[in-house]
Amino acid sequence: MNERQVIETQISKKQAEIDGLEDKIKAAKVYVAALRDVLKLMDKASKPVADVEDTETKLRAGSAVAQAREIILERGEPVYLDELLEAMGKEVTRDSKASLAGSLAAYVRREEIFSRPAPSTFGLIELGHFEVIEEEESPPPDFGGGRSQVDDINDDEIPF
């Protein structure tokens, strides 16, 4: 082997070593990120339910969002979007629905104050209104079984 080949072999070995170390670094970074995610979940789980006074300071008095909170508090249960607008004395239009739903949805996404237990229905986290997870509908038990109307037609009755 000449000197050039020896050096190229050493370079190849060292590059393979570097690649292995880079893979270990990537794996370690993924592990650290996963641990941070676990800490975030633990923080959310241990976070006390929002204090009513704290909630009131987050919402601007008289705003549509504050009015929606008051209506839900009075009723004590999640309220459908159209009913919220009617209770506020606002006209139920596509624009008014989009505006209020967008404002409330921002709080839902941040998991602050409001929850969305059903489509277009908003509740309050402080009242324990959380998302209802519905089971996926399955076909009825007799679905696909038995005879169909097509089976009842005789070949003699087909008009072609």
Image (cartoon, rainbow, N blue to C red):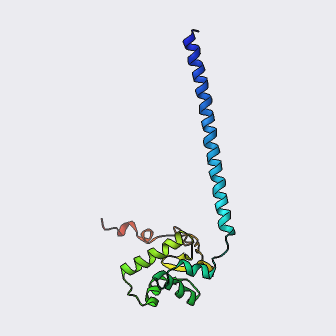
Residue that appears at 50% across and 83% down:
66
In the rendered view, tell whether residue 15 sits above or below residue 3.
Answer: below
Residue found farthest to the left = 160
Q: Nearer the viewer, residue 20 or 157?
A: 20
Report the quarter where the N terminus lies: top right
Residue that appears at 45% across and 76% down:
101
In the rendered view, tell whether residue 27 sits above or below residue 138.
Answer: above
In the rendering, at what x and y percent does residue 134 appear? 57, 73
Side of 91 where 42 appears, left or right = right
Residue found farthest to the top = 2
Question: In which quarter of the view is residue 78 placed?
Answer: bottom right
Residue that appears at 69% across and 68% down:
46
In the rendering, at what x and y percent does residue 147 appear? 49, 70
In the rendered view, tell whether residue 155 sits above or below residue 80.
Answer: above
Side of 56 where 31 appears, left or right = right
In the rendering, at what x and y percent does residue 159 appear? 31, 68
